[in-house]
Structures are given as structure tokens and as C-alpha cells.
Amino acid sequence: DIQMTQSPSSVSASVGDRVTITCRASQGISSYLAWYQQKPGKAPKLLIHGASSLHSGLPSRFSGSGSGTDFTLTISSLQPEDFASYYCQQANSFPLTFGGGTKVEFK
Amino acid sequence: EVQLLESGGGLVQPGGSLRLSCAASGFTFSSSGMTWVRQAPRKGLEWVSAISGTGASAYYADSVKGRFTISRDNSKSTVILQMNSLRAEDTAIYFCAKPYGSGWSPFDFWGQGTLVTVSS
């Protein structure tokens, strides 16, 4: 099974900050990597697919990069509505696996 | 508009069974694989099971293999998760999800989730 390791598990930030979250796969997954945002009591929301493709209708302050085993989600200028948890997910092979999550909290 | 609506959650004793349903609309259901993902209280996301559009292929997480069965009824646009031999660690919100595009994932539409509580 492919293990997905996310870091940090939490980050404290302010509005306007640049936030970077990393995700490492235990083996190469090419670009089969997605990022999700989840707010309390809600279902996850797809942000990025194919490691770097922004899902339709989403603001350009979200970006993804990486391939192989190391991936990054960047929020260029944190907005109030971005305080949430973020998860990576590998789409390379079954069993599909998620990272442990990163909670972006208000500093 | 794509909609996914889960039902069937509730309180069940350890060793018991529960059948979750996900009613889908707004897309060509029979052409889409479907997936169940769960989230234990205050924990992260865990992929549970997936089924192909025809129902011919199914995949399971090791944690549920042999206890859970995924199936679908394309005439009713419904995907089912039959859960047997339930354990306390199966307590979670169960989401059904539709993949983006023609692959198995990622997931661009999710239901609101249904809560399963396994406790005596």
C-alpha cells in the first residue's frame, strides 16, 4: 500500500500569509495526486487534481506542484474562508490513500 | 446538478450489520465508478471501497475486506455498502463520492455523509 505523509499536521497563520503544505508518497505516484479542503461538518471539496491542475471555479491563490513522491499545496495569500483542514490523496493505485491532514488555524 | 444522498446510518451493536445507500442524480450513473470514504470522529479521511460503473469490479480497504460488500443498482442510480461484523473502529461518517472524469478518483462530488455508530 502507498502511504501518504502530510506535514505539518497543523499550521497557525494570518490572513494574507503564504501557506505551504507538503505531502510525501511512500513510492512514486507520477502526478496522480489530489488535494482537498474540508471545513467542520462538511464533506471534502476537491481543490487540485493531477498534482497541479486547479479544479474548475476555484481561486488561483491555490496551487499544487510536484511529481513522483513529493508534492506541495500552496495558498499564496490566505483568506478568512481558507481556514480549514487539507488532505492529499494518491490516485495511482488501490487501495486509494489519504494523507493524515493539515489543519490551518488562525494565528 | 449532481447530487449524492446517503442514508442508512445509525447505532448498531458490535458484531451487527448495517446497509448504507447512496442515491445519485444529475449524471450518467452507469458510466461512473463510485466510492465510499469514511471519517472517524475527529480523524482524517479513509478510503473504504470502490465499484466500477458496471459493477463488475470492486475494491476494498484491508480494514473492511471480508466484512463489507459494495454493490450498485444502475436502474435505481444507487450504490450500496453492506457492512457486517461491525466493530467499534468502524464508527465514522460514511461519505459516498463520485470521481472526477473517467477514472477512479479524485472525487469532485460528495454526499453529506451518514453517521454510523458501533457501540453496545
Image (cartoon, coloured by chain):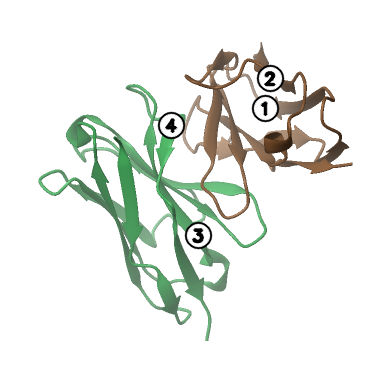
Chain colours: A brown, B green
Which of the two discs, 2 and 3, sits closer to the camera?
Answer: 3
Residue visible at 85% across and 25% down? Answer: A17
Query: Is there a contact, CB below 8 Å, between mark 2 and mark 3?
Result: no
For the residues marked 4 and 2, what is the alpha-carbon distance in whole angstroms?
23 Å
Residue where numbered disc 3 is placed: B93
Residue where numbered disc 1 is placed: A25
Q: Are callouts 3 and 4 both on one chain?
A: yes
Decide which of tag 3 and tag 4 comes sooner along the chain. 3
User: In the figure, is residue A87 to the left or right of B4?
Assistant: right
Residue where numbered disc 4 is placed: B108
Decide which of tag 2 and tag 1 comes sooner along the chain. 1
Circle 3: element type: strand
Residue where numbered disc 2 is placed: A69
The chain holding disc 3 is: B
Residue B91: where, in percent of width, then height? Answer: 53, 67
Residue visible at 39% across and 59% down? Answer: B66
